[in-house]
Image: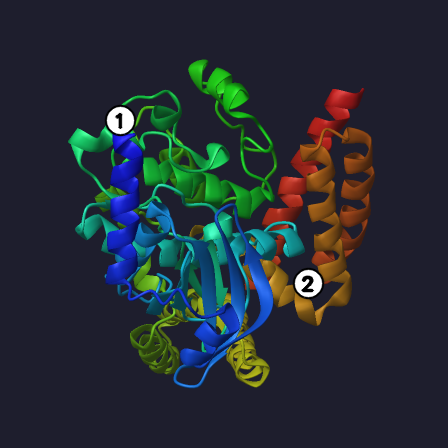
Amino acid sequence: MKKVIRVSLYMSAVRKRYHVMTHLTEKEFLGRHAIKLCEKIGQGSFSTVYRAANERVGVCAIKVMKMKERSIKEVEVLRNLHHPNIVQYIEHFASANIVYLVMDHCNDGDLENYIYKRHKLAESLVKIVMQQLALAMQYLNNINMCHMDIKPKNILICSNPRLTFKLSDFGVAEVINPNEMEKWRQNGTVAYMAPEKIMGKPYDITSDYWSLGVVMFQCLFGRPSYFHASLQAVKAMITKENLMTIPRHSHMSANCENLLRSLLTYNKDDRIKFEDFYKHPFIDINKMPTNENYNYIVILVTDALELESDRKYEESLFKYQEAVSLLHPYIMTEPNPAQKYKMELKFNQYIYRINELCRYISDKIIHSKLCDNSFDLLKTMAKSTPKMLSGINIGVIAEEYFAEGNAIQAFVKINEALALLVPICMTEPTGYRKSLLLAQIDKWLTMGEEIKRITD
């Protein structure tokens, strides 16, 4: 009885604080705030999100929640967070039993649907996702805040003015306090929950890094590690330390795989710490698409031209390759088709210069300098040769069949891919694209031999 009274007093205090007007209908209430609700854009267990129009701020998103402690807490947390990779609080207000949280509108939905529409994401795009989440995590880490429910559904996407990923839904977020571990232990979503939280053990902010690892896994492979598993099933798997298996023949660079395994480390004390996460070669914050980096690309290309005119071909080549690796994220995140086309033209010009320089230097230099996103670069460079691009896409399908255990179909597709790519490679001029193509053909030949050995 005392608990009921305390809750009633708490909610009364909240309504008073939030200046709740109980005598108005919802339409009248929203009209007072110059709000017009449009279509529903999201639905969760505790809330509904609408696109809305506001005379003061224009297009926005409104999260409609029942007046509960969780709702009030989310408002209080979000209004004090200010970061470009965290959804932006605008204002809030409340009616008799409803809290309205007004936020900036993220026009491309959430990461879960984004992955679903594309089946899985290219490693270069996964890198951009993780870079931006790293910046958000750095901000939260500095105030000792644990989000506690990081998952693709809670990562929103804006494409204007540039592709941006934003953390949202801070309803269970907490500033880490050892005295309150028991109270908040199992808040979150089971499939993304760290082992220590599921097992009822003490946790800290590294629990969020496990969740980031599951998000990264889903971006790369199109599904979370414990898809549709119940709490009991996940507990049983975690107890046996039966963690996720990375699909064979997946297109992952060494840095990408290293980060994934570092995030998905069972023992939280051995899991990657923030300082190492932020500085990890795959995150590589220094290569994010920023104005500073774009200016640096201009400097690199200018230096490359000067070095080439001085016949310093190797040094010129390295400058061009660095410029290409920096420019690629801009192309991936540019929403404006005209601007993206201009960037692709520059990209192809730099690739052409790289190919020309390769005529003067050893192939060994090329192989030693292939960047982590070489497969994505190969696909980009193959766009001008439809048969090559078709062969690459068939090879990807073969890998998906093999990962699903369908070795026979995988073998058929591998042969189709190689039948297209090998003749193209034989006539391909010496250069950067040929080096990338040779490396990919060699990988698929090895895969074909393994499939044959298994099926014989």
Residue neighbourhood size for the residue with mark 1, other residues' Cα within 10 Å, grouped as few (<14), some (14–19), many (≥20): few
Task: Give the mark toward the camera: 1 or 2.
Answer: 1
Q: Is residue 184 at least partly visible in the picture?
A: yes
Identify whether 78 is placed above or below 289. above
**Quarter of the image where the C terminus is located:** top right
Give whichever of 40, 10 is nearer the camera: 10
Q: Which numbered disc flags the more N-terminal residue, 1 or 2?
A: 1
The residue identified by callout 2 is 428
Q: Position of residue 424 (x, y in %)?
A: 74, 59
Q: Residue furthest top?
A: 240
Q: Amino acid at mark 1?
A: Glu
Q: Position of residue 101 (x, y in %)?
A: 39, 64
Image-based side of 348 in relation to 61, left or right: right
Using the image, tell me which numbered label, if any, was put on residue 79.
none
SS class, disc 2: loop
Tell me which corner region of the image, top left, top right, bottom left or bottom right, holds residue 365: bottom left
Image-based side of 125 in relation to 298, left or right: right
Identify whether 416 is placed above or below 234. below
The residue identified by callout 1 is 182
* Residue pictured at 39% horizontal, 85% vertical: 56
